[in-house]
Amino acid sequence: MALAARLWRFLPLAHATVPVPRLLTGVAASWGRSCAWRLCGSEVMGNLGAFKRSLLFSAFSYLGFEAYQVFSQAAVVHATAKVFRVEEILEQADYLYESGETEKLYQLLTQYKESEDAELLWRLARASRDIAQLSGTSEAEKKLLVYEALEYAKRALEKNEHSFAAHKWYAICISDVGDYEGIKAKIANAYIIKEHFEKAIELNPKDATSIHLMGIWCYTFAEMPWYQRRIAKMLFATPPSSTYEEALGYFHRAEQVDPNFYSKNLLLLGKTYLKLHNKKLAAFWLMKAKDYPAHTEEDKQIQTEAAQLLTGFNDKK
């Protein structure tokens, strides 16, 4: 009944006004009435095929419209559910990352390695790299993970070129791969790495890690040995270069954005001041690095290096 009622609204005759013949008198009236009925009957019978086609067309139009609404609603529900699902996974991933659960994080994210979501993919690149850096990871596994991380980061960037994190992790992963492809490849990728770090900072000026990494890029080229500089001159008309002052600027900027966010930034502030022969400020930052709470294996390594550098100060006194 509901369908019939709805169909009625679509029928072309539903709201049409049917003409009524004028009344006649006497025999003429009788003949007129019978003729009028015969004419009306023949008109309906003569257009029955058209009426049926109209009815079918209207029915199909209505059913098509109803189907469109059903499928549209289903698509919206599915898309919404998918968004909620991705957000839930990202929340779990971020919790595991903050908790230092590197292996659990990797296990979680590898279930979604075919995802097309940039936020999932760059996190997977980071997790792959973190697993590669664990002390228990073999050299063969480490190499596989490093290349795997680069692939995830590349896909993340392809999916969303406006993601600062995708730019950041793509640059990091290119740098890591350079360790397996030789110094020539590493230097050749230098400008690409710098470009993506700068883009990450442009997209998110409040990300201390991207700023810190730009500082490392400057520090690396400031202390580049002569033979590497020679290779750089062979590869580029204007080879990449930087200064300790430039590196120091980025390390301080990162610290201003997020104080004490990373033990390595503290260590590199100390080491950069050493390169600039400012032992007083070098000691200040190295002490901060040594006293930094160790949450990861890297933190422990940095504590050890900072302590050794401070011991070297005392031995020279």
Image: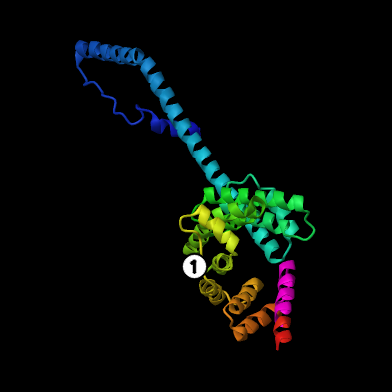
Residue nearer the viewer, 160 or 245: 245
Quadrant of residue 18 within the rendered picture: top left
The residue positioned 57% from the left and 79% from the top of the image is 276
Q: Is residue 144 magenta?
A: no
Q: Residue furthest bottom?
A: 317
Q: Is residue 169 above or below residue 69?
A: below
The residue positioned 64% from the left and 60% from the top of the image is 91
Is label 1 in a helix, a strand or a loop?
A: loop
Q: Is residue 94 above or below residue 293?
A: above
The residue positioned 31% from the left and 29% from the top of the image is 16
Q: Is residue 294 magenta?
A: yes
Instruction: State which region is magenta.
Output: 293-310
Q: How is the image coloured?
A: rainbow
Density class for disc 1 (Cα within 10 Å; few <14, some 14-19, many ≥20) is: some
Q: Main secondary structure of the magenta part?
A: helix
Q: Is residue 132 above or below residue 39?
A: below
Lateral position of residue 210 relative to residue 64, left or right: right
Residue 17 point in image, percent of width and height: 29, 28
Residue 71 point in image, percent of width and height: 52, 38
Residue nearer the viewer, 215 or 239: 239
Picture quarter with the C terminus: bottom right
Query: Can the viewer see residue 181 in this picture?
Result: yes
Residue nearer the viewer, 73 or 133: 133
Query: Can the viewer see residue 167 in this picture?
Result: no
Q: Amino acid at mark 1?
A: Pro
Residue annotated with mark 1: 205
Residue 245 point in image, percent of width and height: 52, 75
The residue positioned 58% from the left and 68% from the top of the image is 223
